[in-house]
Every structure is written in C-alpha cells, then in structure tokens.
Amino acid sequence: MEETVEDSPTSAVLLDHCHFSQVIFNSVEKFYVPGGDVTCYYTLTQQFIPRRKDWIGIFRVGWKTTREYYTFMWVSLPVDLNRDSAKQQEVQFKAYYLPKDDEYYQFCYVDQDGVVRGASIPFQFRPENEEDILVVTTQGEVEEIEQHNKELCKENRELKDTCVSLQKQNSDTQAELHKTQEELEILKSTAQKLEQEAKAQKDGWETELLQLKEQNQKMSSENEKMGVRVEQLQAQLSTREKEMEKLVQGDQDKTEQLERLNKENSQLLLTLTQQKERQKELEQTVEETLKQEETTTLKKQQALKDENAGLSRKLSENKILYDALQKEKERLERENDLLKRENSRLLSYMGLDFDSLPYQVPTSDQGGAGQNPALIYGNPYSDPLCRKLMVHGREKETQWGERGTKRVTENSRCITVGEPGDGISFTE
C-alpha cells in the first residue's frame, strides 16, 4: 500500500450513494505494464468543486465500499477553477504500490466526504503483447512448465499467506510497540514526578530535621530552666502551705463572723420588708393625689380652652366691626370730598372765591364743636351780604346691634343758595 504524509481515507460509503458523472477519467489504457509508474488523467466537470481531502484510488472491479481500495493518491487542488487548464488534472501512481496480479482494476475519484464522484473503465496489469507471443514447446516441457506454474502458484499463495500473516504481525507489533512507547512515556513522566516528589520530600525532611534539632536544643535549655523553676516552686509551695494554715485559722474566725453577719442580715431584711410595705402605701397615696390633681388640671384646662374660644370669637367680632367702621370712614371721606367739590362748583357758579369768604370752617380750637354739625361753612344768615350759601348736610344715624351688625339711616341733603325764600336749591 502507498505511504503518504497524511492519514489514509477511512470513509466507507456504499456504491449506491455515488455520483460517477462529475469526474471523467481520460486516456485509460486497457492494460498497464507491471514495473512502471502509471499516470491517471481526469477532467473535472463544472458541477463539481474539488476539496483538499479528495483522493483517487485503484479499486478491484466488484468493490462494494470505498474502503476496498488497493492504493490511493491525494489529488492536488487547481489554482484557478475558472481556467480550462484547471479542469484537466493528473495524478501519478508509483510502480512499487501497484497491483502485481492480472485482475481487472479501475480508477475511482472519492471526495473528502467519502462519496465517489467518478470511475474509469476497467484495466489490467500485464506484460505488453502477451497475446502475440508464440511459444513452441513439447508436451513434456508443457507438463514441466505447468507443474512449475502450479508450484509457483502454490508458493505464491503461501507467500501471500505469509505476507498477510507478517503484515498482521507487523501491525500487531506496531500497535504493541506504540502502546509500549505510550506506557514508557507514562512511566518516564511518572518516574520524573516521583523523583521530583522524592527530592522535594528529601528537602522537606532535611528542613524538618534541622527544625527538630533546633527544637531539641530549645527543649534541652527549657528543661534546665524548668528544673530551676521546679525547685523555686517547691520552695514557694512550702511557703504557701504555711500561709494556708494561717488562712484556715483565719477562715474559722471569718465563719463565726459570717454567722453574726447573717443574723444581722435577717434583721435588716425584716426591716426592709416593713419599709417596702410603707413605701407601697405612700406610693398609693401619691398616686391618688396625682390623679386628683390631674383631674383638677384637666378641668382648668377645659375652662381655659372655653375662655380662649370666647375671646377668639369676640376678637373675630371686633375685627368685623373694625372692618365695617373702616369702610364707613372711607365712605364718609369720599362723601366729604364730593361735598367739597360741590361747594367749590357752587361758589364758582355764584362768582365767589372760597378764600374771600368772611367765614371759614371752624376748627376745634375755635369752638366748632358747639355749632350745628350740619352747617359745613358756618351759619350763612349771620353775614349781612345779600348772597349767602347754605348747605344742609346729610344726617346720619348709626346703630350697632348684636355681634357687630350696623344699621344706618340717612336723611336727604339740601343745598340752598342765597336768601331764604329765593327758591334756589339743589337736592340730592
């Protein structure tokens, strides 16, 4: 079988799943002469694209699966599939790997998926012009040749069986050798690991030994110190025993004292119980007093709240009254301004000047409060002038009812110009 750099194909595709028309084999001879290299020519069709793992094998006619190849060669991929030269390809089989018998064989193109894409016509491996050679022999020579051929055929079969056995043994030996090599590699790696572990363990032991030696030295020095310490402790122990005897004697005295204290404690507990009872009575009295004071305080607070509510209500009423008085003041001021404008108009109508009048509005210092409040400019009849002005003001009566309610009554206002009886007046 032919040896290649890469692994041999291992696909096992049946004959029914093949496409023989995608690769066409050209110039296939009827027979090839043994001992010479064989060149296989083939053409790639447009429907087929080659791949890197495609191969061409020589199969004996009648094969069933693609594993039944005799030998094979990997195909080379064309650089440019679009060129015509890329469609014409060839592969060469070396003579050493070709069959030595005269059976019929054929080329088969198998792709990397194990599918057959093309197959050639059958051919043989036999000497050239073998049918045209005429051999003249005697009957004895023919028998001798036949006997020799039988012996050769028998020897050939034995050699084939031996070869198959040797090949099997070789494959078994190689498998065992490969297995042994793997085991040897494993053993080597295990040995290296063990050596490393042993070395590390040895180093660890040496380090631990040094530490133990140091600890032993330390323990020896500590033992010496402990011996001295034990002697000191024994001396202290004897001293402590003497002190313990004294303490035992003092303990007896303290026991008697403790008994006396227990009796005093019992009396104190009795007194304390009586004081607690008196304290409970005082607490009950204080609690009742606090409850009474709390009730009185609540009543006072409620009375203060009621009083506060009444004051708030009176404050609201006073505010309403203040707002009403303020509005009334503003209204009176507006009416006063209106009357002033009306007097000025009347004076201008009469041809008089306000500043030239012999009478003015009296002030509080001049006793105006004693005059009639309905006369704005005083009594017009007290002047001897023939033309006088009399203005009767509006009389107002304001009464205040409950909760700040205001009731106002007004009389009509009359303005008279001239002497009484002239009949010149203005009424609003």
Image (spheres, rainbow, N blue to C red):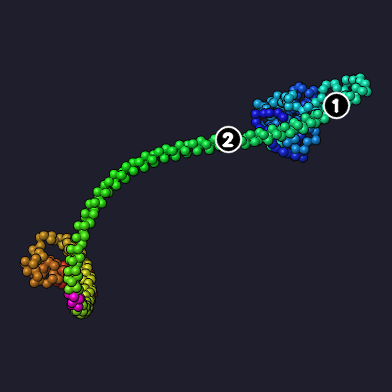
Q: Residue at x 10, y 60 (%)?
A: 356
Q: Answer with the quarter of the image where residue 103 lies.
A: top right
- Give the residue number, with chain letter if any, for mark 1: 149
| Residue 41 in picture, x, y percent from top left | 75, 25
Alpha carbon distance from label 2 to label 1? 49 Å
Q: Nearer the viewer, residue 46 or 171?
A: 171
Q: In the shown orientation, is residue 413 left or right of residue 6?
A: left
- Give the residue number, with chain letter if any, for mark 2: 184
Q: Nearer the viewer, residue 382 or 221?
A: 221
| Magenta-drawn segment | 263-272
* Pointer 2 local density, CA inside 10 Å: few below 14, some 14–19, many at least 20: few
| Residue 290 in picture, x, y percent from top left | 20, 77
Is 278 situated above or below 164? below
Q: Residue at x 87, y 27 (%)?
A: 147
Q: Residue at x 72, y 38 (%)?
A: 12
User: Mark 2: which secondary structure?
Assistant: helix
Look at the image and say whether residue 270 sits in the magenta stretch.
yes
The residue type indicated by label 1 comes to Asn
Is 368 situated above or below 235? below
Q: In the shown orientation, is residue 65 left or right of residue 348?
A: right
| Residue 58 in picture, x, y percent from top left | 75, 30
Q: Answer with the quarter of the image where residue 87 lies.
A: top right
Q: Residue at x 67, y 34 (%)?
A: 173
